[in-house]
Image (spheres, helix red, strand yellow):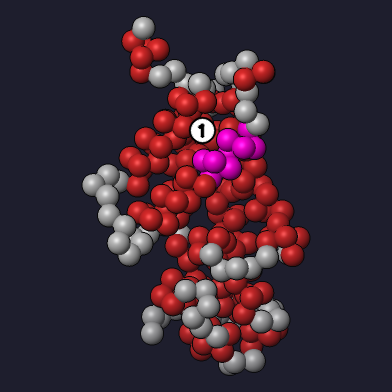
Amino acid sequence: MPSSRKGYHHGNLREALVNATLELIESRGPLGFTLSEAARLAGVSPAAPYRHFSGRDELIAEVARQGFEIFADLLEFAHAKGGPSSLASFENVGRAYLTFAQKNPGHYIAMFESGISINANPELAAVANRAMSVLARSADELSRRLPRNRRPPGSMVSQHIWAMSHGVVELFARGAPGARSSFSPEELLEAGVGIYLRGLGIIPSDSQTKG
């Protein structure tokens, strides 16, 4: 069994349980452990988690909430760093999505693969909306390159890119069984986004550039 990232210290029970849960999610998946096992890994009694959480799902929801906080901050930083170019901001946000998933697998799994209901938890829903609104805002800014009558909804563009990013993460960034590529996840996402944006006419095709 893995050792907890941070031992339990008086007054830090909540965070000790979150850290233990992150390790268990990474090693066993979100459904592969009990609340008692999280307590044991955190170095506390089986009853201790109930001071803060009603059960395992609520603990995982807290892991997801913290993950979305980190995720939102990272996306906002990436978006701002690309300014004033809307294309650079958009590309930065896509790369930040991959970076987050690779560096924070436990959080990522809790957020997107644990089966928790985001909208059932107001705090979780608020921070999740903050994170995903960065991608939507970036897509809106980029879509303004097109005439209004040819402009796709920014929300649709952002959801397409989100789906593409998630697919690259699941298949190639996290080593899905049987998924092999001679290209890095970053290369796959960059090429896919480029093809998609050229298809919409948001960025010029190679032939248009040469012409």
Q: Which residue is mark 1?
A: 90
Residue at position x 60%, y 72% in the image: 60
Viewer-side residue, 194 vs 78: 194
Q: Quadrant of the C terminus?
A: top left
Viewer-side residue, 24 vs 15: 24
**Residue 70 sits in which quadrant?**
bottom right
Residue 185: x and y in percent read 35, 47
Residue 14: x and y in percent read 62, 75
Vertical relation: 174 (above or below) 165: below
**Residue 189 sits in which quadrant?**
top left
Viewer-side residue, 187 vs 38: 187
User: Which residues, given as a range, are shown in magenta?
Assistant: 154-162
Residue 23: x and y in percent read 45, 74
- In this rendering, the count of numbered labels is 1
Residue 59: x and y in percent read 62, 75
Residue at position x 60%, y 55% in the image: 69
Residue at position x 62%, y 20% in the image: 150
**The residue tagged with tag 1: helix, strand or loop?**
helix
Could you tell me the amino acid type at mark 1? Phe
